[in-house]
Amino acid sequence: MRLVLYRPVHVAVVQSWLDDPEIRANTPVPEPAPADHAANWLTRFGDEGAWVVLDGDADGDAAEVVGWACAPVLDLVRGEAELGYQVAPTHRGRGVATFALRELTDWAFAKGVHRIQLHINNANAASQAVARTCGYSYEGTKRESYLKQGQRVDTQLWSRLVSDPNPMESRAADAYGQGMKS
Ligand SMILES: CC(C)(COP(=O)(O)OP(=O)(O)OC[C@H]1O[C@@H](n2cnc3c(N)ncnc32)[C@H](O)[C@@H]1OP(=O)(O)O)[C@@H](O)C(=O)NCCC(=O)NCCS
């Protein structure tokens, strides 16, 4: 898998996911999704604020678009960022979101960000698992902070600081330690 910047060539496939029930329930995409919603993200997120996850070795058309991710907040003065992600309904449960969040976390810290936030629907256990795997910590619940499908629901705030442990490094250290013992 690899992340590439979101471009006009990706719009149609991303737009095709937007009526998926999980995306409707767990992201700010309006309901029904306007026909030009994914196209508008090109403008909303600019040159370096949205990406797609491509699956497959080939470049260009042969690689399949399996995920989308964004940085709705990137404030290099305050050192703060917020990230978001969604995965094609047919490609869930294969590590796509974990890959995207891990890569974008590294990207934001490399830019000088100190703190990254995620807002996750209280009922979205899969996204919470992704955050945990990528080294984010649960900070608390924002009560009735999210108006979706006519109801106000709680959202969870998760964060990772640049000084927090990188789970990828600790996994590598564990593997090294096990290797030394055997
Ligand atoms: C949430 C979402 C992004 C996850 O994408 P994904 O590519 O399937 O995620 P991954 O395969 O990387 O990881 C999924 C994790 O959730 C876990 N999971 C999946 N369904 C779960 C459930 N119902 N309860 C608890 N955990 C669950 C998996 O076991 C896995 O955790 P693990 O790595 O510890 O085993 C995807 O379901 C999605 O696009 N949902 C709609 C949009 C959305 O919710 N975006 C996030 C907004 S915060």
Image (tube, helix red, strand yellow):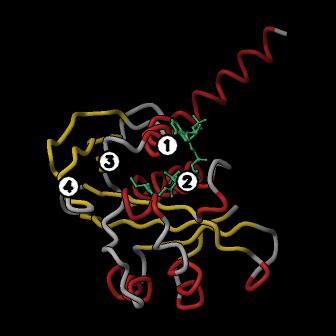
Q: Quadrant of the C terminus?
A: top right
| Residue visible at 41% across and 67% down in the picture | 70
The residue at which mark 2 appears reads as 97
The residue at which mark 1 appears reads as 126
Secondary element at image label 4: strand
Look at discs 1 and 4 and give the one toward the viewer: 4
Q: Position of residue 112 (x, y in %)?
A: 34, 56
Label 2 beta carbon less than 8 Å to ligand 1 = yes
The residue at which mark 4 appears reads as 151
Q: Amino acid at mark 1?
A: Ala
Secondary element at image label 2: helix
Classify mark 3: residues with Cα within 10 Å, few (<14), some (14-19) or many (20+): many
Label 1 beta carbon less than 8 Å to ligand 1 = yes
In the figure, 125 relative to 98: above or below? above
Q: Amino acid at mark 2?
A: Ala
Q: Earlier in the sequence, mark 3 or mark 2?
A: 2
Q: Which mark is residue 121?
A: 3
Q: Position of residue 179 (x, y in %)?
A: 80, 18
Q: Is residue 166 left or right of residue 169?
A: left
Q: Earlier in the sequence, mark 2 or mark 4?
A: 2
Query: Could you tell me how far apart the alpha carbons at marks 1 and 4 are, in whole angstroms?
Result: 21 Å
Secondary element at image label 1: helix
